[in-house]
Amino acid sequence: MSHLSLPFESRYWPVKKLFDVYERSIREPEEFWAEQARQLDWFKTWSKVLEWEPPFARWFVGGQLNASYICVDRHVKTWRKSKVAIYWEGEPGDVRVLSYSTLYSEVNKFASILRSAGVTKGDRVALYLPMIPELPIFMLACARLGAIHTVIFSGFSAQALADRINDIEAKLLVTADGGFRRGKVVPLKEIADDAVALSPSVEKTIVVRRTGKPVAMKQSRDFWLQDLLEKAAPFVEPVPVESNHPLYILYTSGTTGKPKGIVHSTGGYLVQNYCAYKWAFDLKEESVYWCTADVGWVTGHSSIVYAPLAHGAAIVLYEGAPDYPSLDRWWNIIEKYGVTIFYTSPTAIRMFMRYGEDWSKRHDLSSLELLGSVGESINPEAWLWYYQHIGGERCPIVDTWWQTETGGIMISPTPGIECVPLKPGSATFPLPGVDAAVVNESGELVNPEERGLLVIRKPWPGMLLGIYGNPERYKEAYWSRFPGMFYTGDYAIKDKDGYFWILGRADEVLKIAGHRIGTAELEDAAVSHPQVAEAAVVSKADPIKGESIVVFAILNEGSTPSVSLKKELTDHMRRMVGPIATPDEIYFVSKLPKTRSGKIMRRVLKAVANDATIGDLTTLEDEASVEEIVRAYQELKKAEEEAK
Ligand code: WT7
């Protein structure tokens, strides 16, 4: 087995069965994945399992399938026809329960509406919706026609929405008259109108009635979904697409520039996710699966829509805030629908932990069998609290590491095969087929317990097809650092037992409450304020959100720092990007520390923002600027404390 270059030796694997599956998946990846792929329904079998022209991978080449057929049609041919597909709860407490047969008829009708609106195979459709059943239904309806959906998180601003629509030149935008969040209505249609004014490609919008609040409708451009439904056909033939036909595009932040449109395939993506959820979550048709993420992120795409529905499980979809109207809203939902698998973020756990276990104690959570964590590393304290107070010391916690780019879970315990002994804070071992490794700056494997960069050394079926319209950026972002290895952008260590520990981003990407946002986007938003000349953004460790945003800004000549200007800049950044771009701290400074080549030294700013030591500054052009920053920071801190 020495020729295999397995990421770890068998003696590190505490469980035999998992090791055997893993070992085979690395030894015979094509046979292995072909076997997995056969579990899905294909209209036509592939002629080639993998075409690998680095760095482009094409899986199940020539195979034909349809994602809506796999997630819906195949279930209505079985007993699952009358079982629950979606338990939906709105924030105000309204409930809708959809069986697979209802879902089937809705997906067909929605597909017929899209078809009447001129949508055909390969067209891009933008979905800007709250967490209501119409969102997954529209996704599946797009997939039915072979159209490519782009879901834009409903917390993003008009500008962010327009940027994404323009990048894919979407002809159609689907939105709603609003959505509920903490008792208030988010005016999605208004935001969408502002975005459409900046997006010439949009010919039509379809509007879902959710809140009943009056909205402006533009004649012959905007259409109410409910009116279109009256004329909708009850059946639309699912369009067979080649395995590598894009299922969706989802934007995510990178190190530089605007967000990248990550393109996912249909066949490889579905195979990866079908397997990953069986392995990591032991997902079955009788599971009641609740992932609390928003469908607007990749977690929502895979863990709310495609994986659980491909398995014929029931999903829970909840529209609103976790603490509305009270802190036991989530626990109430678990009890009410008998959730068996619960998947959330460390940020949420830490938030609940702060308020104590009295809230979860009010509810019977005994239906839970398995818990999951995703989006950021989970600290052992939060892990233990989750294990004790939510899982009743009964449920394993699967800490799942993956990314928008990977499409599916990559490193995680796999109780669906065999559960390794868990270590709180470690995502444990790679899933079968995933050749993960930790390397140094030169791409060589590091020793156990040594920090390095996480890479994936072989293509996997859920791997992104590319970045929409930008193959060069795709090569540059993921494959240029270490030729032949996918660069994840994360630091990691493998401990002496072979367990992986993810240590956070190694690049200029922040994780705010598990949400990914690039410093470049935040800086662009800050400097677009008329009074800001230059800005640098770094993160600060946050006990709940993991990281929070700190802005250092140089004002234009003639502008004076003030509390009101801070507030204005905060509002401005929220308007440009969305509430996730809210800075926690803003410091007005007169200089930023830079290298001789003019690059901002974020490392220095980060140290300042985190009260840490600054380290080696020999590459700094002007060390005085660091002292100034430190002084400015300390003065501001003092001033803020005095103000309290
Ligand atoms: C980044 C990807 C795909 C899930 C949602 C996030 C961080 C994700 C973990 C974990 C430690 C994690 C990484 C990764 N991350 N899961 N279990 N432990 N860190 O998707 O927005 O594309 O972000 O999230 O830093 O690179 P994303």
Image (cartoon, rainbow, N blue to C red):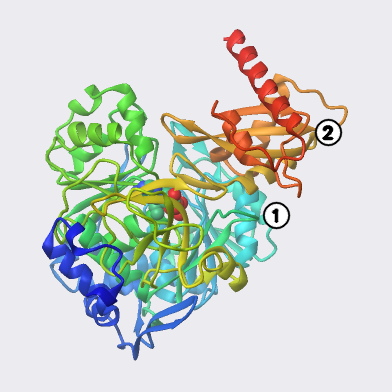
Give neighbour class at mark 2: few <14, some 14-19, many 20+ (Cα, 10 Å).
Answer: few
Q: How many marks on residues?
A: 2
- The answer to whether the residues at label 1 and label 2 have Cβ atoms under 8 Å apart is no
In the image, taking residue 471 as reference, residue 349 lies left or right, namely: left
Query: Comparing marks 1 and 2, which lies closer to the viewer?
Result: 2
Q: Quadrant of the N terminus?
A: bottom left
In the image, taking residue 182 as reference, residue 554 lies left or right, namely: right
The location of residue 38, given as percent across then percent down, is 23, 80
Q: Residue at x 71, y 21 (%)?
A: 564
Residue 556, numbered label: 2
Of 68 and 580, the residue lying toward us: 580
Residue 408 position by quadrant: bottom left
Does mark 1 have its CB less than 8 Å from ligand 1? no
When the figure is inspected, residue 532 is found, relative to residue 225, above or below; the finding is above
- The three-letter amino acid code for the residue at tag 1 is Ala
The location of residue 575, given as percent across then percent down, is 64, 40
The location of residue 643, given as percent across then percent down, is 61, 9
Label 1 SS? helix
Residue 112 in view here: yes
Q: Quadrant of the C terminus?
A: top right
Label 2 SS? loop
Residue 283 in view here: no
Give neighbour class at mark 1: few <14, some 14-19, many 20+ (Cα, 10 Å).
Answer: few
Q: Which residue is mark 1?
A: 197
Q: Residue at x 27, y 67 (%)?
A: 274
Residue 284 position by quadrant: bottom left
Of 342 and 51, the residue lying toward us: 51
- The three-letter amino acid code for the residue at tag 2 is Asn
Q: In terms of sequence position, does the residue under pointer 1 or pointer 2 come before the other?
A: 1
Q: How far, Cα to Cα, is label 1 from label 2? A: 30 Å
The location of residue 380, given as percent across then percent down, is 28, 35
Of 223 and 541, the residue lying toward us: 541
